[in-house]
Amino acid sequence: MLRWVIRDKLTLEYLGGCGVNHFESERHVAVIGYELHYGSWGKGIASEVLEKVVDFLFSAACTHSVNRIEAYVMQGNMGSERVLNKLGFIKEALLRQHSYWKGRYHDLSLYALLRDDWHRGSL
């Protein structure tokens, strides 16, 4: 696990967090997650932060060899889907009842970005 805090650039107020939930070394996969306080939604913060996370994960500075980054999005979270689409992630699957949260099962969408697509500048 590798996590970063997201803070306002001017006030340093805590806005949320992001990072790698886990690495799957055999497959060269990093599974990312991110969360922002409601008041920070729709301001481009998640896009800006995740672009930096992706740059880092696909760089030589990352101690893990990452070829694929995955993100799971709860159905109906359109803001999160827009962020991932903007960064070039592709929706690959619908995982039915893949998550259990607040007393019920939820469907998740699996999004992925490949190193080749990121470096090719397909965004």
Image (cartoon, grey):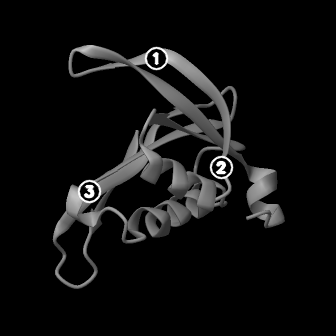
Q: Residue at x 52, y 48 (%)?
A: 81
Q: Give coordinates of residue 14: x percent, y percent.
A: 18, 64
Element under disc 2: loop
Q: Residue furthest bottom?
A: 10
Number of the label disc, if any, that sits on residue 16: 3
* Image position of 13 (left or right of 49): left
Q: Give coordinates of residue 65: x percent, y percent.
A: 67, 44
* CA neighbours of label 3 inside 10 A, class few (<14), some (14 to 19), many (20+): some
| Residue 45 vs residue 107, the one in the foreground | 107
- Asked whether disc 1 touches disc 2, contact meaning CB atoms under 8 Å apart, the reply is no
| Residue 66 vs residue 119, the one in the foreground | 119
Rendered-image quadrant of the C terminus: bottom right
Sequence-wise, the earlier of marks 1 and 2 is: 2
Q: Give coordinates of residue 19: x percent, y percent.
A: 42, 49
* Image position of 59 (left or right of 17): right
Q: Is residue 40 above or below residue 89?
A: below
- Can the viewer see residue 10 in this picture? yes
- Can the viewer see residue 61 in this picture? no
Residue pointed to by mark 2: 89
- Asked whether disc 3 touches disc 2, contact meaning CB atoms under 8 Å apart, the reply is no
User: Which image quadrant for residue 1?
Assistant: top left
Element under disc 3: strand
